[in-house]
Image (cartoon, grey):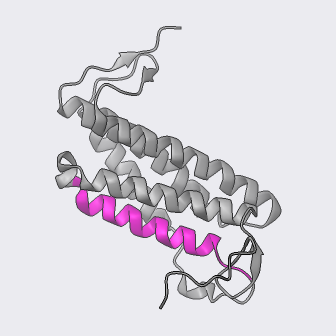
Amino acid sequence: MKVYTRTGDDGTTSLAGGQRISKNHPRIDAYGTVDELIGWIGLLRSIPENSSRTELLLTIQGKLMHCAALLAAGKGAMIEKMKAPVEADIRLLESSIDEIEKELEPLSSFILPGGDPAGSYANIARTVCRRAERVILKLDREQNVQELIVKYINRLSDYLFVLGRKMASEKGTPEAKWIP
């Protein structure tokens, strides 16, 4: 299988199922942003401080790949083989958030990202995740997106927020409070 096909040189791409659409279509924006998020999660997974979280981060990447596949499914795609997130996936994120929050100081104000590269990467992943949610919701207005994809992405951004805080805490990096 070649990496390049030249079929996209005209500004179009194929969806799963063979349908061709413009590369600036909201569907492409949605699964492309999820793809970007998968890359950021991969970076987080590669950070030594996350060695105990490798399995969860791999699971998240796998769920995001399924989400991207569903978002890339056009007419004729065999979506029955694609696995949307289920409530158990969302509960896994929620229980992970709850466990991390037990070890963190409660928030009393907004915090400014930064201070530590590892925690900052988690915050960048969080902002990409929020963007993914926005573009998926935009696509949902035009074409129905499975509700649990939106819910999973929303909860994942919460997880990435507390992960960033936890990573900074583990390194002893103080949080910079936003003082309006």
Residue found at x 44% / y 16% = 109
Q: What kind of secondary structure does the magenta stretch mostly adopt?
A: helix
Compared with residue 73, is residue 157 higher up or lower down, i.e. above or below?
Answer: above
103 sits left or right of 154 in the view: left
Give x and y (percent) for residue 62: 40, 69
Residue 27: image quadrant is: bottom right
Furthest-top residue in view? 180
Along the line of sight, the residue nearer the viewer: 10 or 152 = 10
Q: Which residues are magenta?
A: 53-74
Locate the C terminus by quadrant. top right
Furthest-right residue in view? 142
Residue found at x 34% / y 50% = 95
Residue 26: image quadrant is: bottom right
Q: Is residue 39 visible?
A: yes
Give x and y (percent) for residue 23: 71, 67
Residue found at x 67% / y 65% = 28
Compared with residue 59, is residue 168 higher up or lower down, i.e. above or below?
Answer: above
Give x and y (percent) for residue 169: 23, 29
Give x and y (percent) for residue 157: 48, 45
Along the line of sight, the residue nearer the viewer: 17 or 145 = 17
28 sits left or right of 157 in the view: right
